Image (tube, rainbow, N blue to C red):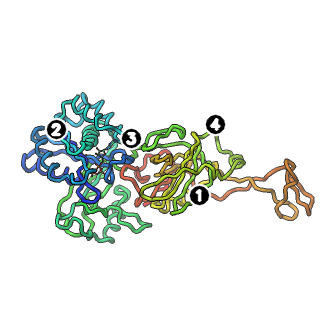
Amino acid sequence: MTVVGIDDTDSRERGMCTTYVAREIADRLQKADLATVSRLLLVRLNPAVEYKTRGNAALAIHTECDPDRAFEIARERLEARSETDDERTNPGLVVAAHDPDEAVPADDVSRFTHAAIRDHLEISDAAALIDRHGYQSWHAGDGRGRIGALAAIGAWTALGEWTDEYIAYREPERWGTPREVNHESVFTAAEWGYPDVWDTVDRDENETVCVPHTPGPILYGIRGDETDAVRAVADRIESEPVATTQRFVTNQGTDVHLQDGAIGDVADGRAYRLEGRVASEPETRRGGHVFVTLESPIDGDVVSDGAANDNATNDGAANDNAINDGAATDETTGDESANRLACAAFEPTKRFRNRVRALRVGDRITACGEVSDGTLKLEKFAIRDLVRTERVTPICPGCERTMESAGRNQGYRCRDCGTDAAGKANRSLERDLEPGWYEVPPCARRHVAKPLVRGGFDAPTHPER
Ligand code: ATP
């Protein structure tokens, strides 16, 4: 068997799409060489990588074709298709003459794939590994694309969880023109395919999430757990003529980018799953972005009703570094304290912000997202423990008016009735959140982020659709 890995062919302004180049290579391998192509992998790498064009995708083609011939065909297509007039496009090709799941190179190439998904790599890391295994490679520009190409080769052994994407491509003469896709038919097809097929539409935003807005060749991409189901949903969509279609096996919707971490140890450009305690009241800032500070849980810190709110302060001081989110440009904040971390739900996450606004100081949560400029961009969170009461000034049992302070450390007193109370009273809180997982809506989902509807979470889920 032969594994062909490719990456970095497209440009934000000029279009193209590496999935399309992979499909063309697979097509030529099958037609020109009558070689079997068993699958195309679409592998999403670290979404925090600054060099990415959009979704940081790399592609692998698993084929029976002779490796030299596969290399020749892939190189010809990459040279023809890569938008190398854009200096940010640095295509790479790596060809491995072994089975996709062969054990010998699997260890270090698998590790490389994991690092490409969760960490940052150097071009020299890829070049050294390519040499060590005697893989054939080609590149243009600075050759950064070899990182993704090699990561795509290791993906089959590195990853255990796969989903499907069925992509319909446009006729080339239509590229760059507005897409003609019947809105209603997408919603009807999405409803029919749910929950095996997900992130096709966003019902609240009335958005056809599966139809891109970029100038490239994709008409729509249908994602889900079942090969037959994604294809059937695609078949139900009414649109302009579809030039070609292709099934991809992907790591989309799997959360494989998240690593378990501790609030004090996070680093920029990586994505985490963190346990913490809400340490500031959520705050909506300019641009509609919502911020909340999380702090490390104290050992044995179980939220007991009432007690958690004794030190409920809106820690304004915690929020005074500026970050620039890129997608949702605004001045935002980080937290300099080692055991505190600013978390943000940016405006594009829409109704998810209401979930974050509903948090209260003392709530125990698990927060997931990428850390950028010291701030965690929330993708999902789980409520582990909710504060159910708050501490308030006591009410006089006689006249039902609020008591007044009787002086420092002297409790409270009702001047009219003469009643007194030793300290604050507990009042139960109405909460708009329940234990379990909350997520951003489909319109704001990262490719690699796992939609709650897919299941397998450690608590009840509240899926968005
Ligand atoms: P395309 O459709 O062209 O693949 P994209 O959004 O997937 O677009 P690329 O244009 O491929 O992004 O740019 C990402 C670049 O970053 C590639 O050259 C890839 O090899 C490289 N890269 C990917 N992951 C990492 C990583 N973890 N560390 C360093 N470089 C990386």
Identity, as a three-letter code, of the amino acid under mark 2: Thr
Q: Are marks 4 and 1 in contact (CB under 8 Å)?
A: no
- Which circle's residue, 4 or 1, is located before the other in the chain? 1
Say which element carries label 1: strand
Judging by the rendered image, the residue that carries numbered circle 1 is 283
Provide residue 236's location: percent of width, then percent of height: 27, 66
- Observer-nearest residue: 10 or 188? 10
Identity, as a three-letter code, of the amino acid under mark 1: Glu
Quarter of image, res 354: bottom right
Q: Are marks 3 and 4 in contact (CB under 8 Å)?
A: no
Judging by the rendered image, the residue that carries numbered circle 3 is 118
- Front position among marks 3 and 2: 3
Q: Residues within 10 Å of mark 2 (few under 14, many from 20)?
A: many
Judging by the rendered image, the residue that carries numbered circle 4 is 300
Q: Residues within 10 Å of mark 1 (few under 14, many from 20)?
A: some
Numbered label tally = 4
Q: In the image, what residue occupies the spot 46% across and 59% down?
A: 329
Provide residue 218's location: percent of width, then percent of height: 25, 60
Provide residue 384's location: percent of width, then percent of height: 57, 46
Q: Quadrant of the C terminus?
A: bottom left
Judging by the rendered image, the residue that carries numbered circle 2 is 2
- Which circle's residue, 3 or 1, is located before the other in the chain? 3
Q: Residues within 10 Å of mark 3 (few under 14, many from 20)?
A: many
Say which element carries label 2: strand
Is the distance from the Cβ of mark 1 to the nearest ligand 1 atom less than 8 Å?
A: no
- Front position among marks 1 and 2: 1
- Which circle's residue, 2 or 4, is located before the other in the chain? 2
CA gap, disc 3 to disc 2? 26 Å
Determine whether 20 is above or below 98 in the image. below
Q: In the image, what residue occupies the spot 44% across and 67% down?
A: 204
- Front position among marks 4 and 1: 1
